[in-house]
């Protein structure tokens, strides 16, 4: 195939698919064994300084905040992060100084709530480097290629733009139509962390609401940590196997963390904690405020249970559960601030 | 009824959507315009979000994220991003709404950086799904405020393709035939694209002069027979304010 154009972005997460399958054969257990560990163990075992991480969910939705706080608490450094609609997850890691490089599809913003003050400071000041650009579709298709054990996915996106010129993709002449097409290289993150509604002790997972790209990401990552709202019996999984979206085969660790996505939204269970997000967005406007935030909610608490008490405990969580059902008063305290 | 220019803008955008079609949408003005269309002129419009929700009904609160539970309220399917982007790539996306920090005369969009790429004065979120929507949907509608720093001859970064360097350039780059920007809706009026792929003013809102439009752009605004867009009706305004009771979108303008 004739190569027509090559993006000059850094190629993150690349691995020859043949080498990856051999790595899988040597390193991934195909046996259905119990994988339940604590949050502390999961982080210390799988997150190495400088590794490439990707988080499931969608920025503020179904992200594993409990895991992210523990990464910060353990002082991990030099991380590379897949900015695949990475929002509150990535912003917290950047604010806490854990991140060195980001490949950006959508990052440094809080959607309707505005841009991230901490991430903007880090990127504009050069502390965190954007090593490549791409689009949302492109990122998940990079994972899809990896999930299928293939070197690339072809797609009609990014063509003709600076997004492509700053990406790690290539444009080739498609031998079937004779037209240019974009080839998205497979991406195999070192670690993916996905928060789910329920799974069993082996890691057979169910997710409610939009799947985003978690089915692809789960299969692309070398190591996969599942955090779950609750652990359920395997008989429950086996009764309705069509509801399983990630089977045990890909999973390396299972951690039970109820409300593990707070202050983010867990579809069907609890809505955003806008008050907490507004406090975060306001404190992270300055370096001092950022320190204060992490002192209060991450370094200053022993574990996620203590964090939940500090953010408002049972009463607050009840209210977020009610909001998720469409009851109660929605508030938007970050407005105008 | 009195109304703001932001309200006029959302109403004008909602009127562009033909009933029975599909629209890829995002948070903020796009979802508000899509919901308003459904509640008024286009009850059979299917709203689709890139995180995976297909054809939801009116949610109890405006979605704050493209993936939050409100986007999937009474939807017919909670699918995946692969699913939604694939349906767009296969030709099922009639409209897509996009916003931008900068637009050029060919409808190319920047949402990546302001200033030089290596040392940006503002680092913006990047493409997100914008490049995909702008590459794959039949008719892209850009919803953005216009002023001299946003309507620019040259973008600081070309994130999402419009007509690139003119009609035909998209196809030469490999983008699917027959796609591209269709309308640009600002706080002053509505634009289309000419035979050569350059923006041209089609309509202005009541009370807006051509001079004001031209003073709010760094590139020359081409205008033929410019019509006046009718004011929002009382029903449109009431519906809009019911959809955004806290003014999180319309109250900002």
Image: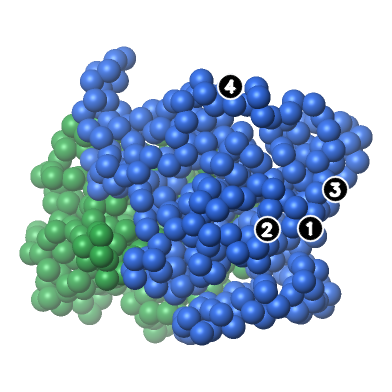
Chain colours: A blue, B green
CA distance separating discs 2 and 3: 17 Å
Between tags 4 and 2, which lies in front?
4
Q: Provide the chain ID for the residue under circle 2.
A: A
Q: What residue is disc 2 on?
A: A67
Q: Is residue B243 left or right of residue A303?
A: left
Q: What residue is disc 3 on?
A: A231
Q: Residue furthest top?
A: A176
CA distance separating discs 4 and 1: 33 Å
**Upstream in sequence: badge 3 or badge 4:** 4
Q: Provide the chain ID for the residue under circle 1.
A: A
From the top left corner, tell me how far across and down residue B174 is, in percent: 25, 31
CA distance separating discs 3 and 4: 31 Å
**Upstream in sequence: badge 4 or badge 1:** 4
Q: Secondary structure at mark 3?
A: strand
Q: Secondary structure at mark 1?
A: loop
Q: Are marks 4 and 2 on the same chain?
A: yes
Q: What residue is disc 4 on?
A: A22
Residue at the (39%, 33%) spot, across then down? A184
Disc assigned to residue A72: none
Q: What residue is disc 1 on?
A: A257
Compared with A89, A37 (above or below) is: above
Compared with B153, A8 (above or below) is: above
Q: Secondary structure at mark 2?
A: helix
From the top left corner, tell me how far across and down residue A267 is, in percent: 69, 56
Between tags 1 and 2, which lies in front?
2
* Dots 1, 2 in contact, CB < 8 A: yes
């Amino acid at each position: 195939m004739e190569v027509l154009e090559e993006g000059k972005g850094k190629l993150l997460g690349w691995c020859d698919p043949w080498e990856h399958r051999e790595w899988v054969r040597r390193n991934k257990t195909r046996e259905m064994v119990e994988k339940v560990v604590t949050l502390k163990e999961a982080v210390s075992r799988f997150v190495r300084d400088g590794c490439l991480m990707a988080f499931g969910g969608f920025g503020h939705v179904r992200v594993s905040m409990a895991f992210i706080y523990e990464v910060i608490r353990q002082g991990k450094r030099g991380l590379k992060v897949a900015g695949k609609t990475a929002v509150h997850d990535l912003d917290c890691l950047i604010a806490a100084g854990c991140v060195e490089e980001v490949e950006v599809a959508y990052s440094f913003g809080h959607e309707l709530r505005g841009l991230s003050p901490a991430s903007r400071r880090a990127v504009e000041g050069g502390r965190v480097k954007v090593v490549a650009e791409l689009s949302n579709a492109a990122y998940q298709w990079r994972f899809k290629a990896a999930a299928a054990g293939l070197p690339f996915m072809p797609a009609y996106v990014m063509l003709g733009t600076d997004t492509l010129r700053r990406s790690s993709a290539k444009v080739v002449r498609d031998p079937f139509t004779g037209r240019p097409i974009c080839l998205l290289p497979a991406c195999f993150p070192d670690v993916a962390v996905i928060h789910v509604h329920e799974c069993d002790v082996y890691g057979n997972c169910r997710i409610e609401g939009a799947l985003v790209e978690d089915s692809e990401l789960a299969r692309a990552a070398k190591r996969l940590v599942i955090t779950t709202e609750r652990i359920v019996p395997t008989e429950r999984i086996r009764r309705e196997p069509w509801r399983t979206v990630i089977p045990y085969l890909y999973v390396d660790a299972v951690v039970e963390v109820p409300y593990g996505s707070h202050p983010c939204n867990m579809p069907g269970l609890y809505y955003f904690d806008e008050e907490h997000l507004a406090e975060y967005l306001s404190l992270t406007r300055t370096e001092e405020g950022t320190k204060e935030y992490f002192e209060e909610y991450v370094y200053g608490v022993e574990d996620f249970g203590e964090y939940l008490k500090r953010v408002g405990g049972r009463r607050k969580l009840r209210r977020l559960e009610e909001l998720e059902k469409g009851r109660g008063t929605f508030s938007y305290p970050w407005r105008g601030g | 009824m009195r109304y703001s220019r932001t309200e006029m803008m959302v109403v004008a955008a909602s009127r562009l959507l033909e009933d029975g079609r599909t629209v890829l949408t995002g948070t903020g003005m796009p979802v508000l315009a899509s919901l308003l269309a459904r509640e008024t002129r286009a009850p059979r419009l299917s709203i689709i979000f890139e995180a995976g929700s297909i054809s939801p009904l009116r949610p109890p609160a405006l979605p704050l994220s493209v993936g939050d539970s409100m986007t999937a309220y009474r939807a017919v399917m909670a699918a995946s991003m692969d699913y939604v982007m694939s349906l767009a790539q296969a030709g099922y996306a009639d409209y897509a709404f996009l916003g931008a920090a900068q637009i050029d005369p060919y409808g190319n969009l920047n949402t990546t950086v302001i200033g030089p790429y290596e040392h940006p004065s503002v680092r913006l979120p990047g493409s997100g799904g914008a490049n995909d929507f702008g590459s794959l949907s039949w008719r892209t509608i850009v919803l953005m405020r216009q002023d001299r720093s946003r309507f620019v001859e040259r973008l600081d970064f070309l994130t999402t393709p419009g007509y690139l360097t003119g009609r035909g350039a998209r196809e030469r780059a490999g983008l699917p035939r027959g796609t591209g920007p269709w309308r640009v809706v600002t706080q002053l009026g509505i634009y289309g694209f000419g035979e050569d792929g350059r923006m041209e003013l089609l309509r202005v809102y009541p009370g807006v002069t051509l001079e004001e439009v031209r003073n709010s752009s760094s590139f020359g605004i081409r205008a033929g027979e410019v019509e006046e867009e009718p004011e929002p009706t009382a029903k449109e305004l009431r519906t809009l304010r019911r959809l955004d009771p806290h003014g999180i979108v319309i109250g900002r303008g």
